[in-house]
Amino acid sequence: MRLVIQRVSEASVTIDGELFSEIGTGLMVLVGIAEGDTPADVEWLAAKTAAMRIFPDENGVMNRSVLDIGGEVLAVSQFTLMASTKKGNRPSYIHAAGYELAVPMYELYCEKLSELLGKEVKTGQFGADMKVALINDGPVTIVIDSRLRE
């Protein structure tokens, strides 16, 4: 699994011109799932997401997590995070998980993160053509890959 985590002051998902989800201060998380990903990957990434200290403390030092600040999370499934650009100019998505694995893993990630935060993780709609808007605060953007454990 691969995550792109952005610290935001607000974020939203619109589908077919209708607002689907929105959050205030917190994290916008793009979630890519690969063939072979497991619930252990989900557990590790959910814990990392909840505890990552990327919000400023009273001294302006990134020392607080989304959990510490009571922030919100918007998680959007994005298979293009698993793109391979090794050959040619058209990305290959051969390593991206199919629907049968990707949907339950994405839902499990949102569920586990909700449990850790003690509040609902807002979502996009799997497979929909979404318009994602956000204001990246900082900007702060972190990429985490469960296979690399970094």
Image (spheres, rainbow, N blue to C red):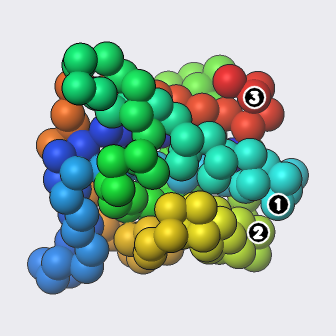
Marks 2/1: CA–CA distance:
11 Å
Q: Residue 67, image x and y in percent? A: 45, 51
Report the residue marked by disc 1. 39
Label 1: element kind = helix
Q: Which residue in the structure is indicated by mark 3?
A: 149
> Disc 2 marks which amino acid?
Leu
Q: Are marks 2 and 1 in contact (CB under 8 Å)?
A: no
Q: Looking at the image, which residue is at 52% across and 35% down? A: 52
Please name the residue that numbered disc 2 is placed on. 101
Most extreme residue toward the front is 58
Quarter of the image for the C terminus: give it. Answer: top right
- Mark 2 vs mark 1: which is more N-terminal? 1
Numbered circle sitting on residue 71: none
**83 vs 126, nearest the viewer:** 126
Q: Nearer the viewer, mark 3 or mark 2?
A: 3
Q: Horizontally, is 129 left or right of 82 in the view?
A: left
Q: Judge the density around disc 3: few (<14), some (14-19), many (≥20) Cα neighbours within 10 Å.
A: few
Amino acid under disc 1? Pro
